[in-house]
Image (cartoon, rainbow, N blue to C red):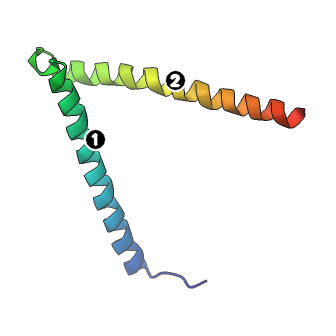
């Protein structure tokens, strides 16, 4: 297997970083549009309060995802034991 040069890897990394940036921008626009549609832009909430709210919101769904992942692992272990 041929190894890639450092320069080639840096070019590929820059392209991936650009893709990540574009994906983040699309996600930000989507969340912003949803917030606007629900009237959240009219609320008098500081950036610090928004960050706290978003962290709580993310934690709520990360916990749900974590619980589902653990349930799947338990189910797989049970199936393997049978």
Question: Callout 1: 10 Å neighbours few (<14), some, many (20+)?
Answer: few
Q: Quadrant of residue 50?
A: top left
Residue 19, placed above or below residue 73: below
Q: Earlier in the sequence, mark 2 or mark 1?
A: 1
Q: How many marks?
A: 2
In the image, residue 34 above or below residue 26:
above
Residue at the (45%, 24%) spot, across then down: 61
State the residue at coordinates (31%, 58%).
Answer: 19
Give x and y (percent) for residue 39.
14, 18
Secondary element at tag 2: helix
Residue located at (82% from left, 33% from top): 79
Q: Which mark is residue 27?
A: 1
- Seen in the picture, residue 2 relative to 14 is either above or below; the reply is below
Residue 77 image offset from top left, x and y in percent = 80, 33
Which corner quadrant of the image does residue 45 belong to? top left
Nearer to us in this view, 13 or 27: 27
Where is mark 2, residue-wise? 63
Please give left or right for residue 33 compared with residue 62 in the image.
Answer: left
State the CA–CA distance, disc 2 to disc 1: 21 Å
* Residue name at image x 89 percent, y 33 percent: 81
Residue 69, how many percent across, how many down?
62, 32
Q: Residue furthest right?
A: 82
């Amino acid at each position: 297997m041929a190894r890639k040069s450092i320069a080639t890897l840096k070019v590929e990394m820059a392209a991936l970083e650009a893709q990540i940036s574009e994906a983040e921008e699309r996600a930000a626009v989507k969340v912003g549009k949803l917030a606007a549609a629900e009237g959240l832009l009219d609320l008098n909430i500081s950036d610090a309060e928004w960050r706290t709210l978003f962290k709580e919101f993310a934690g709520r769904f990360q916990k749900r995802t974590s619980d589902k992942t653990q349930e799947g692992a338990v189910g797989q272990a049970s199936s393997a034991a049978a």
